[in-house]
Image: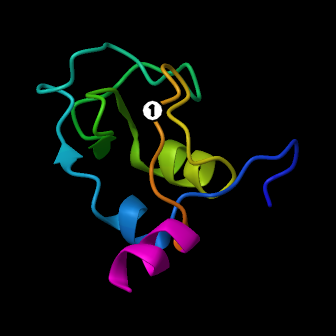
Amino acid sequence: NGGFGALPASGLAIARLPVTSAAEAKAQDCSVCLEAFEESDELRTMPCSHDFHESCIFEWLRVSRFCPLCRFPLPTEEDEAGSVL
């Protein structure tokens, strides 16, 4: 439990986030750390199309499964386990 009732995203869901380059990003900066994207930064894109620094969004999703901008939910470990059965 990430506190305040937050649940972390599953490790598999986090690992599946596609890698994006700063040139492909729709935004100019990371909404988690508020730093501008640099050309050499490795970014990840959420299914809702929001881009973040990889380290920022991974740390965020280990606490809360929701996109920090639009609250799009990634599956939890329990969701992933339930989908297999």
Which residue is at a point 69% across and 52% down the rendered structure image? 63
Residue 61: say if magenta.
Answer: no
Q: In the rendered view, would you say 26 is above or below 48?
A: above
Where does the magenta region start and end?
78-85
Residue 37 location, quadrant:
top left
Residue sitting at the far front: 85
Q: How is the image coloured?
A: rainbow
Q: Is residue 70 left or right of residue 40?
A: right
**Residue 11 image point, x, y percent:** 47, 71
Q: Which residue is mark 1?
A: 72
Q: Is residue 80 left or right of residue 17?
A: right
Q: In the rendered view, would you say 27 is above or below 55?
A: above
**Residue 67 image point, x, y percent:** 50, 33
Specify the quadrant that holds the N terminus.
bottom right
**Residue 69 image point, x, y percent:** 51, 20
Specify the quadrant that holds the C terminus.
bottom left
Determine the secondary structure under disc 1.
Answer: loop
* Callout 1 crowding tier (Cα within 10 Å): few <14, some 14–19, many ≥20: some
Which residue is at a point 33% across and 39% down the rendered structure image? 46
Q: Label the magenta part by its dominant secondary structure.
A: helix
Using the image as rendered, state which of residue 47 and residue 43 is in the foreground.
Answer: 47
Residue type pointed to by label 1: Phe
